[in-house]
Image (cartoon, grey):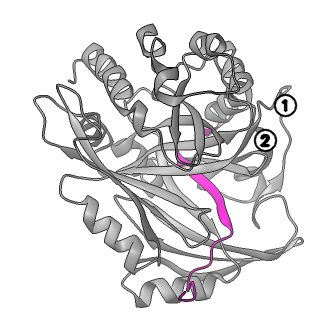
Amino acid sequence: MTQDFLPINGTDHIEFYVGNAKQSALFYQYAFGFELIAYAGPETGVRDRASYVLRQNKITLVLTTSLQPDSEISEHVKKHGDGVKVLALWVDDARKSFQETVVRGAEPAFEPKVLKDEYGEVVLAAIRTYGETVHTFVERKHYKGPFLPGYKPRTSGVHVEPIGLKYVDHCVGNVELGKMNHWVDFYEKVMGFSLLVTFDDKDISTEYSALMSKVVSNGNGYIKFPINEPASGKKKSQIEEYLDFYKSAGVQHIAIATDDIIHTVGELRRRGVEFLYVPETYYEDVLERVGTINESLEELKKLNILIDRDEEGYLLQIFTKPIQDRPTVFFEIIERNGAKSFGKGNFKALFESIEREQELRGNL
């Protein structure tokens, strides 16, 4: 066993660049049950942007909007719409993480820097990955504040009801045709990740479209990044639609774990979150495929939750529709009952569901 040169404790936070952070923050508080815990903006001495930090259990989302028309944030939103800019990784040593990855070929986004305030200090450094996405290494062992120096504590002005979201299970990237292996190699060589699983166009295809996907994971398995690219089909795949509207490679979806998917999805639906629809015929033979499960099939059918099984156990999963007007970023809610996989048995049903949505948008 070679020593892991990039030990990662987990996902530190995910930062979205958005057109209106104040309104987006309200959506995540009301619909997804995130608590507002910190804020940075003009009132805290930050002149060019406003950022709202939201948390539920181990998931931290940062929503950032520009206060100027000609900033990097404004350009990002103009080009991509609301989207993920930063997948931040929690590490014990940000300087070492930066050096080890840069020496292996990572392109720096910014050099290590120390931020301080009355709660202590944080070391940050960042490298570039696919599209305009960056990985920021966050070292916070000498910090006791709510989020990062420069952010002030702030609480939700609305009554927030958490819905049982626990942690980030995996984050999926969509990349251009022919680029999947390039980025898999990047994660293997530059970050020391290993290839967990491969899906080809025979695994993920319908009559009309297909994609290829490889999943890379870090040493302890806390960070899993599936990387998708389009595969040739009769019509346009969901990956091509994403690339057309996002205008580059980028984060396609964030999968969030729950211990009680029936409660979580029931609440999300009640609060107006829309999900992809899978026809009722899916449930006619699903138990023949996946065997015994603890949940009521009727409950799962009512909420349109999908089921799959691997050698280790089974999982339950569902995918939201895109959470902004461009058909780009969405969320997956997943409950794992032993299963380590990603729902391969559901790919065809999901793809057909996505194709129905694409057809409505005129993008198939």
Q: Closer to the camera: disc 2 or disc 1? A: 2
Q: Which residues are magenta?
A: 1-21
User: Mark 1 belongs to which amino acid?
Assistant: Gly
Q: Residue at x 51, y 27 (%)?
A: 320
Dividing the picture into quadrants, the one containing residue 103 is bottom left
- Residue 276 versus residue 76 in the image, above or below: above
Left or right of 113, for residue 192: left
For label 2, the SS is: strand
- Residue 38 versus residue 135 in the image, above or below: above
- Residues 60 and 115: in front is 60
Does the segment drawn in magenta span residue 20?
Answer: yes
Q: Of all residues shown, which one is farthest toward the left? A: 234
Does the segment drawn in magenta span residue 4?
Answer: yes
Residue 323 is tagged as: none
Measured in 3D between alpha carbons, the distance from the residue under mark 2 to the one under mark 1, in whole angstroms, is 8 Å
Dividing the picture into quadrants, the one containing residue 119 is bottom right
- Residue 314 versus residue 159 in the image, above or below: below
Asked whether the beta carbons under mark 2 and mark 1 sit within 8 Å of each other, the answer is: yes
Q: Is residue 283 visible?
A: yes
Identify the residue under disc 2.
36
N-terminal label among 2 and 1 = 2
User: Mark 2 belongs to which amino acid?
Assistant: Leu
Identify the residue under disc 1.
157
Q: Residue at x 32, y 72 (%)?
A: 185
Rendering coords of residue 110 (x, y %): 50, 77
Left or right of 173, for residue 119: right
